[in-house]
Amino acid sequence: MVLGAIGVSAGFLSVPESVEELKEQMASQDDGHGGGHVADATPSEGHGDGATGDEAHDDDAHYEHVFGQLQNRPWSAIYIACFFFMMIALGTLAFYAIQYAAQAGWSPALFRVMEGITAYLPVGTILLFLLLVLSATGVNHIFHWMDPELVDPNSENYDKIIANKSGFLNVPFFLVRAAIFMLGWNLYRWISRKYSIKLDETNDQSYFKKLFKFSAVFLVFFIVTESMMSWDWIMSLDPHWFSTLFGWYIFAGMMVCAFTVIGMVTMYLKSKGHLEFVNDSHIHDMAKWMFAFSIFWTYLWFSQFMLIWYANIPEEVTYFVTRIEDYNILFFGMVAMNFIFPILILMNSDYKRINLFVIMAGIVILAGHYVDVFVMVMPATVGTSWYIGMPEIGAMLFFFGLFIYVVFNALSKAPLKVKNNPFMKESEHFHY
């Protein structure tokens, strides 16, 4: 966490303080005294002593554009890491609710692990909401549509498309929606944890029935709010673009990351002598979920990409053209990490029972989906001025450390076995 905080701080300090300072830095790079991806964005013409007035104006606009991208870079790095770890906790909460609503018999052995992971949700949502508020108040500009000039018909920067969406995409409604989503998720998380502990303490089965009812209601709330969340917090970063599959796409990525973390935390605790009631069949089933949702995610990725790419409608295909041209290795690399690697490792049923193989697949899957979020956010906020440096590494390390601390601290607060769950005996004797 400390290393991450230092990295993020260094990222903010490395941002030029003015357009003039940026010009000096880029000029020094042209002279061979530096390097980096940003140097590629330096104009090749029109910034010499003989530039015309129009060329000089274009150059100034270019430098201002790059300056804005560089200012967005540390904020975008923080936003990616914050959203990624929050969505792991949210996906785990949804899976937890599914188990109660379905009255699943195999999974109660893993309930305390799930509850520990969801303990990060209050922390993650508070930090994410703070970032959204900072965007809304103009501290950062990662949400382009929040610029009031874009919806002002008298402004030279007026954007008709964004103005037509302003009934939904406006700052007050945006923040109200975010608050409702987060309050609803955290309310269910608080109720489910409270009733789960009460069930253990009292053996009053009415708490199990309440958990069943609250879980069913939460899942309806979740599937609606998850889709809207994906539109608001990710898709609106590219306000001219939309995809009707996007809510499902974010859902698939969220759930496969949740399954992976549940499995990895379970295997770690078991290796330390805990969770003795968890057997290889539980690990096998978690690996099956990882495999299945990796295929589901790939199906959604391909469906979205193929239909938009071959329809070749300019306002839609631009989204993918930008990512293929400027983020080529990351864009296709994360597809390989999220599809090809899980296929090779997890297709074999026997491999799903071997912890080493599941851990290897899990690390690649989590890294691949982190890159997926990176590729969704960075092109819209930073554009061509991206590279992997201290802000990106620092933000990831900070939120990873915070996630580990919160989760394992929560795991230490209650017994790891839900002893009075009516399906616990079935779960203990579960064999695939």
Image: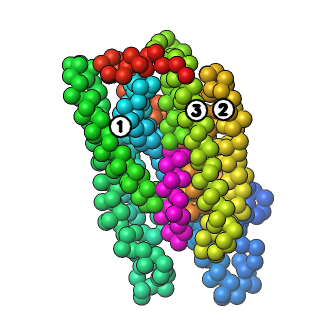
Instruction: Please tell me whether residue 243 belongs to the stretch shown in magenta.
Output: yes
Q: Which residues are magenta?
A: 235-254
Determine whether the residue tagged by mark 2 lies in a helix, strand or loop.
helix
Judging by the rendered image, the residue that carries numbered circle 3 is: 288
Which of discs 2 and 1 lies nearer the camera? The answer is 1
Label of residue 285 in the image: none
Q: Amino acid at mark 3?
A: Lys
**Residue shown at 67%/23% (left/top)?**
350
**Residue shown at 61%/77% (left/top)?**
60
- Label 3, residues with CA under 10 Å away: few <14, some 14-19, many ≥20: some
In the displayed structure, 346 sits above or below 63; it is above
- Considering every residue shown, the one lying at the far right of the view is 32
Query: How far apart are the alpha carbons under marks 2 and 1?
Result: 27 Å
In the displayed structure, 397 sits above or below 18; it is above
Q: CB under 8 Å between callouts 2 and 3?
A: yes
Q: Amino acid at mark 2?
A: Leu
> Which mark sits nearer the N-terminus, 2 or 3?
3
- Label 1, residues with CA under 10 Å away: few <14, some 14-19, many ≥20: some
Quadrant holding the C terminus: top right
Determine whether the residue tagged by mark 1 lies in a helix, strand or loop.
helix
Foreground of the two, 115 or 308? 308
**Residue shown at 70%/88% (left/top)?**
52
Label of residue 346 in the image: 2
Quarter-of-image position of residue 173: bottom left
Examine the rendering and report whether any part of residue 276 can be seen. Answer: yes
Label of residue 101 in the image: 1
Q: Amino acid at mark 1?
A: Ala
Examine the rendering and report whether any part of residue 63 can be seen. Answer: no
